Image (cartoon, helix red, strand yellow):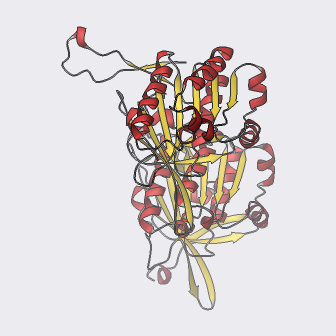
Amino acid sequence: MVRKTTTRRGNLTPSARMPEIQKVPSGIRGLDELTGGGLPAGRPTLVCGGPGCGKTLLAMTFLVKGARDYREPGVFVSFDERIVDLAANVSSLGFDLVELQEQKLIAMDHVVLDRQAFQETGEYDLEGLFVRLGHAINRVEAKRVVLDSIDSLFAGIPNAAVVRSELVRLFNWLKERGLSTIVTAERGETGLTRHGVEEYVSDCVIVLDHRVIEQLSTRRLRVVKYRGSAHGTNEYPFLIGRRGITVFPVTSLGLAQIASAERVSTGMADLDKMLEGKGFYKGSSVLLGGGAGTGKTSIAAHFVEAACRRGERCVFFSFEESPSQPTRNMRSLGIDLQPWIESGLLRCHSTRPSLHGLEPHLASMLEEIDDYRPHVTVVDPLSALLASGTQHQTQGMLLRLIDHLKTNGVTALFTTLQTEDDLTHLSISSIMDTWIRVLNEDVDDDVVRQLHVVKSRGMAHSTKRRVMEITEHGVRLKDEAPKSLRSQ
């Protein structure tokens, strides 16, 4: 499958204009978006990086998705790993290399390089590789090729001029046959690659990085160059998950979301009354802040249950409790979430904030949202993510998450731990459509819970504090809080 991408032509005359750059979809979610349609068709792409950053998996995904989804057979030539080991490694991603080989959609070859033989025969020559590669290409009528890894092919060759000459010869051989190729390479100590020439003769260069900051790891991808095509130049987080590699080009936020006039219930009739009797706007973002034990999760459970009763899909992300804890706890309020989980309308995901860095957290959440397409999402609590990064980093991650949810029309409720002295410690209340605060007040050796709608854009709403009670029949709002409390 080949896509055409229009290039900028400037003031060239029609006869002097260059042809449009053709691209092939990589099959990797997000990568085609930031490259404007995929990798260059019939040209070599270099994928480089350190050990464990995902080079082979990215290349294999390009090959398998091309054969399986776009009917473009491919050839994978390994200079390091045995084919049986590669097949076992990628089976966890749902890639059945044995079946694809039986269907003649993929040809696999492990080339064992004997350096002693090179020394005995004299000059370095790739003719043997061309014959072997050509045979594999003809056998499956390949359109895509992967060479993993190019370092092993040229290991022990000290002459940089020879390496460059043979690389150009190899790439030209692939170009002449119109093969869309990925070549992987290890990152060098001072340059992108060990030999320092691969990046110059490649038409597209992608750098993968696996960094660890304060004991938290994050994988990132950057398109260093792409001849003849515009492309995203930032670093983008990517996730190696159960469905393969997913790239999230979310560092450029837009403000083109469509604001819906439709309303959805909060799940609490008393709270709906405070919001014109109709609840939140569909696709809006709601911040529910308060101290520990103020009932934030209980209010969120009402919201989730109401959505499930409407037949809407919901995702509940928890960073402090296992999936079974909120389910058990909410039964004391008369809310049973288990039937909605069993029906498939509600998915609960629990992760310790310290398990990953912020970008892997964001990547896994966006992957779940994109796969499940929920109508409603709850994140409980946002403040727990501060354990995975600095305040500034957490703010940036949350801005991207909120932007993604708004873009997809998902009604989102975020709980966060807030105190009287630190009401907006994440500095995100200003971008929320609705902000609700809950708090506890000590009165005569008793605790009085209160709820206060700080703001709700686009609708009339009550700003008075209401006494809140958590009962066996759910959360209830009573009369206005006494003036003695409201003045505190």
The quadrant the N terminus occupies is top right
Residue 367 place in picture, x, y as percent: 60, 45
Q: How many marks?
A: 0
Q: Can residue 397 be seen from the camera position used here?
A: yes
- Which is more toward the observer, 299 or 376? 376
Q: Is residue 112 above or below residue 264?
A: above
Looking at the rendering, which quadrant does residue 456 occupy? bottom left
Q: Can residue 278 be seen from the camera position used here?
A: no
Q: Is residue 36 above or below residue 48?
A: above
Relative placement, left or right, of 95 versus 26 is: right
* Residue at x 79%, y 43% (from the top left corner): 343
Residue 308 place in picture, x, y as percent: 70, 46
The quadrant the C terminus occupies is bottom left
Relative placement, left or right, of 105 versus 460 is: right
- Which is more toward the observer, 138 or 360? 138
* Residue at x 49%, y 20% (from the top left corner): 173
- Which is more toward the observer, 129 or 104? 129
* Residue located farthest toward the bottom when viewing the structure as drawn: 444
* Residue located farthest toward the top when viewing the structure as drawn: 15
Residue 212 place in picture, x, y as percent: 53, 62
- Which is more toward the observer, 397 or 195? 195
